Image (cartoon, helix red, strand yellow):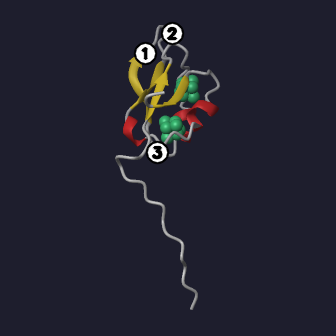
Amino acid sequence: MLVSRRKPIVISEEKRPRYDVIVDTEQCDGCELCVHYCPKNVLIIGKGTNTRMIHYVEVAHPNDCVGCEQCERICPSVAIFVRERGE
Ligand code: SF4
Ligand code: SF4
């Protein structure tokens, strides 16, 4: 029988890098693309509105962000940015 020698990569919670997700609320068009593409359900469309009366995206679960930058890449309005904490 074949025995796997591979070990799972387990990163402890303390060593896991953290990320800040910054939203330019005035620039956000509320299209929800980032909400749907985020693999960790970090983002939501909130109740607040910007000066154009558009419900902008909010960071609901910042500690769940894995820094994949999908939201930053998909945003057609260049309204969301991801940075490693401390950068
Ligand atoms: S970087 Fe990835 S995990 Fe973090 S909010 Fe954006 S899409 Fe979600
Ligand atoms: S993809 Fe950009 S414009 Fe659309 S909701 Fe997200 S931050 Fe706003």
Q: Real-space Cα distance between discs 2 and 3?
A: 28 Å
Residue at left 40%, top 26%?
46
Residue 64, how many percent across, how many down?
Answer: 40, 42
Q: Up-down: is 75 above or below 37?
A: above
Residue 39, how many percent across, how many down?
Answer: 51, 46
Q: Real-space Cα distance between discs 3 and 1?
A: 24 Å
Bin the neighbour count of mark 2 within 10 Å (Cα to Cα): few under 14, some 14-19, many 20 and up. few
Classify mark 3 as within 8 Å of ligand 1 or not, answering yes or no. Answer: yes
Circle 3/circle 1 CB separation < 8 Å:
no
Residue at left 61%, top 28%?
75
Q: Tag 3: residue type?
A: Lys
Q: Tag 2: residue type?
A: Arg
Q: Which residue is mark 2?
A: 52
Instruction: Left or right? Give the position of 77 relative to 63.
Output: right
Q: Which residue is mark 3?
A: 40
Label 1: state its secondary structure.
strand
For marks 2 and 3, the one nearer the N-term is: 3
For marks 3 and 1, the one nearer the N-term is: 3
Label 3: state its secondary structure.
loop
